[in-house]
Image (cartoon, rainbow, N blue to C red):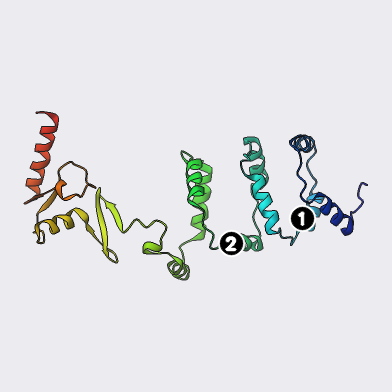
């Protein structure tokens, strides 16, 4: 059978016979051992396989099966090293890059996936070689054109449409500020004090957080100091009481 091509009819029969069939764990182990001791494929064989699969698209059902088969499967360090060595220096064609780009358009990872990625990358640092490559790539790329900037601005999600939206509240120098107008943030503790005393704060007046927690903007936790010196005195007195002196 060596070198004997299989007809399309035979392929269809084999596919129909194997449809819905699941291999036992024992059979999978045997196949794994057989492939482990098998010599690497020649460039000619790879080219033939690539030609057979060129233009082939998997059905949604088949993709779902592949996804289910890979769930919970972890690649060993040895396999990762082999994959890395095989892909080193490899460049995708413009056509393949376009396909990857189209496949990712409008796709957003779930919160669970984002958490998994963050956990897997925690404590990870790029090697000096990788950092140099990234730096060189950005240097060659040059500044972003105005056309690209305009496109990014057009697709950017702003306000409550942005996944990082936190109600317009940001932390600046430890104090919380809220968005009141586009590009205009006001400190929450000063707004609370203004409402509590029924007037605008005078120039030089400082709002003090009694418990020292700058994000605790409850009315009962705020005190109004007439000037920065009075605020410093309040902080010093609280520190003295806290230390028992």
Asked if residue 20 lies left or right of residue 160, the reply is right
- Image location of residue 230, percent across then percent down: 7, 46
Few, some or many C-alpha atoms within 10 Å of disc 1 (few <14, some 14-19, many ≥20)? few
- Image location of residue 175, percent across then percent down: 23, 50
Residue 178 visible at all: yes
Q: How many marks?
A: 2
Please tell me the numbered disc located at residue 50: 1
Q: Does label 1 or label 2 sit earlier along the sequence?
A: 1
Residue 126 visible at all: no
- Image location of residue 120, percent across then percent down: 51, 41
| Image vertical order of residue 237 relative to residue 13, above or below | above
Depth order, front residue of 70/135: 70
- Pick out the residue farthest to the top: 244
Please tell me the numbered disc located at residue 65: none
* Residue ID for mark 2: 101
| Residue at (67% x, 40% y) in the render | 82
| Residue at (70% x, 59% y) in the render | 59
| Residue at (21% x, 56% y) in the render | 187
Asked if residue 8 lies left or right of residue 133, the reply is right
**Residues under labels 1 and 2: Cα distance?**
21 Å
Few, some or many C-alpha atoms within 10 Å of disc 2 (few <14, some 14-19, many ≥20)? few
Asked if residue 243 lies left or right of residue 38, the reply is left
| Residue at (9% x, 54% y) in the render | 205
- Image location of residue 170, percent across then percent down: 30, 54
């Amino acid at each position: 059978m060596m070198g004997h091509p299989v007809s399309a009819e035979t392929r269809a029969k084999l596919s129909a016979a194997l449809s819905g069939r699941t291999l036992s764990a024992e059979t999978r182990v045997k196949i794994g051992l057989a492939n482990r001791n098998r010599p690497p494929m020649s460039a000619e064989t790879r080219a033939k396989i690539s030609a057979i699969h060129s233009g082939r698209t998997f059905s949604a059902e088949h993709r779902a099966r592949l996804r289910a088969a890979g769930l919970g499967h972890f690649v060993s360090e040895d396999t990762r090293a082999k994959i890395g060595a095989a892909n080193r220096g490899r460049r995708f064609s413009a056509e393949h890059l376009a396909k990857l780009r189209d496949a990712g358009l409008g796709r957003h990872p779930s919160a669970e996936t984002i958490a998994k990625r963050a956990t897997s990358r925690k404590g990870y640092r790029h090697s000096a070689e990788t950092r140099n490559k990234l730096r060189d790539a950005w240097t060659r790329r040059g500044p972003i054109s105005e056309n690209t900037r305009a496109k990014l601005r057009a697709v950017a999600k702003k306000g409550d449409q942005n996944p990082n939206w936190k109600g317009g509240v940001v932390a600046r120098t430890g104090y919380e500020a809220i968005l009141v107008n586009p590009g205009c943030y006001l400190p929450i503790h000063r707004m609370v004090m203004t409402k509590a005393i029924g007037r605008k704060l005078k120039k030089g007046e400082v709002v003090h957080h009694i418990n020292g927690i700058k994000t605790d903007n409850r009315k009962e936790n705020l005190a109004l100091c007439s000037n920065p010196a009075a605020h410093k005195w309040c902080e010093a007195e609280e520190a003295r009481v806290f230390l028992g002196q």
